[in-house]
Image (tube, rainbow, N blue to C red):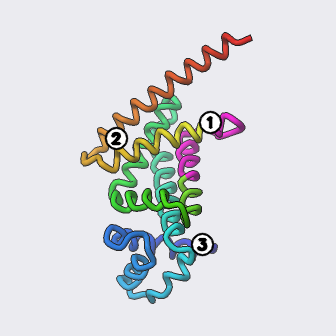
Amino acid sequence: MTDDFAARRDDVLAATLRHVPALGWTPRAVRAALADTGADPDDADLLFPHGPDELVAAFLAHIDRQMTADAAAADIAGLSLSKRVRAVIALRLACLRPHRDAARLALGLLALPYGAWRATKAAAASIDAIWHAAGDPLDGFAGITKRATLATAYGATLLVWLRDTSDDDGPSLAFLDRRLAGIGRFNRFTKRLRSCLP
C-alpha cells in the first residue's frame, strides 16, 4: 500500500465515520462519504475491497495511531507500569469518544461468526499497541499472558464505556481501576505462590 493510497483511505475513513451511525460499517457508508467530497462513489470498492471487516480494521488502526501519538506526547514515563497502562487506555477512550456509536457497531461486527477475522486481528493488534504505548515489551510467554490479561480488562471496560454517559469517562475508568487492582493482587499472589514451590 503506497503512502498516497493510505492517506486517501484515512481521509475517506474520517468522512465515513459521519455515516456509520446511520448506515453501519458498510460500503454504503463509504459511498456516502465519497459522494460528500464529490468523488466517485464506486471508489469504495477500490479503497476497501474486503467490506465491513476491513473498514473496522482501518478504524481500529486509526485509533491505535492516534492513541500512540497522544501517549508519546503525555508525561507518563515516570509512572508505574499499571498506571502507564491505565493512562494509555484513558487516552484510547478519549480518542474513541467522538465515535461511540461507530465503536459500538464495530464491537458488534467482532462478535459475528463469519467475515470478522480481519477486524478481530486488528483488535488484537490494538492490545499490542496499548502495551507498546505504555512502554512495555511483549516478549515470550509473559507477552502472551499480558495480552490475554489486558484483553480481558480492556474488553470489559469497553463494554462499560459504551453505556457511560459521562463527559470524562469517569465511571469507565473507575471500573478499569478495579480491574487493574484485581490483576495486581492476583499477580502478587502467584509470585508468592511460586516462591513457596520447591
Mark seen at residue 172 = 2
Q: How many angstroms separate mark 1 from mark 2 (CA)?
A: 23 Å
Mark seen at residue 145 = 1
Identify the residue position indicated by label 3 in the image: 3
**As shown in the figure, which amino acid type bears the numbered disc 2?**
Ser
**As shown in the figure, which amino acid type bears the numbered disc 1?**
Thr
Q: How many angstroms separate mark 2 from mark 3 (CA)?
A: 36 Å
Q: Residues within 10 Å of mark 1 (few under 14, many from 20)?
A: few
Give the number of marks: 3
Mark seen at residue 35 = none
Instruction: Indicate which disc, 2 or 3, sits on the residue closer to the N terminus.
Output: 3
Callout 1: SS: helix
x 39%, y 73%: residue: 15
Q: Residues within 10 Å of mark 3 (few under 14, many from 20)?
A: few
Instruction: Indicate which disc, 3 or 1, sits on the residue closer to the N terminus.
Output: 3
Callout 2: SS: helix
Across and down, in percent, residue 32 comes to 37, 81
x 58%, y 53%: residue: 125
x 58%, y 63%: residue: 118
The quadrant of the image that shows the C terminus is top right
x 34%, y 46%: residue: 161
